[in-house]
Image (cartoon, rainbow, N blue to C red):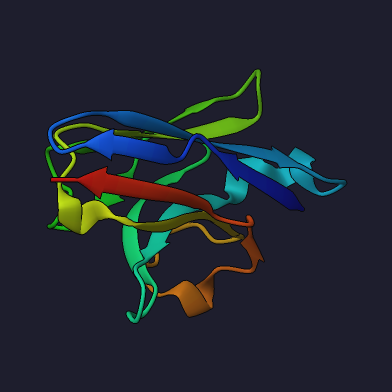
Amino acid sequence: VQLQASGGGLVQAGGSLRLSCAASGRTFSIFSRYVMGWFRQAPGKEREFVAAMMWSGGSSYYADSVKGRFTVSRDNAENTVYLQMNSLKPEDTAVYYCAADPNSYIETSPAEYDYWGQGTEVTVSS
């Protein structure tokens, strides 16, 4: 399984960005049983959970710090998961990673995710 994250950049506080995570690989056909997660890591801090959803649709879960501002979604035809980030704050500045967990329920610990993208940097200026 390969994950390719993109869409990061520099944005002013209050602005929006949409991150993409393109998934591929020989086991991709079973992605319907995967959890797709987004995490972030700010300088000097541990990697933290942001949001996740079941690839099959339905369940999604958000960290309290982003609830109501971020939305995770997927496009089956494009094999891509998105993180729409609105009302961005300076404290959202971090490297954002997408990850995949072959599980049937959403986990928030990075240790539970088997596959990771390379990260895309988001900087929110005040």
From the viewer's side, name the closer residue of 81 and 88: 88
Q: Residue at x 63, y 55 (%)?
A: 117
Q: Residue at x 46, y 44 (%)?
A: 54
Left or right: residue 50 versus residue 98 is left
Left or right: residue 106 versus residue 102 is left
Q: Quadrant of residue 15?
A: top left
In the rendered image, the vertical position of residue 14 relative to residue 38, given as above or below: above
From the viewer's side, name the closer residue of 59 and 21: 21
In the image, farthest residue toward the top = 77
Residue 57 in sight: no
In the rendered image, the vertical position of residue 126 relative to residue 45, given as above or below: above
* Image position, residue 74 (x, y; %): 49, 29
From the viewer's side, name the closer residue of 49 and 61: 49
* Image position, residue 100 (x, y; %): 58, 56
In the rendered image, the vertical position of residue 31 relative to residue 96, given as above or below: above
Q: Quadrant of residue 30?
A: top right
Left or right: residue 30 versus residue 25 is left
Which quadrant of the rendered structure holds the C terminus?
A: top left
Q: Residue at x 26, y 28 (%)?
A: 16
Residue 110 in sight: yes
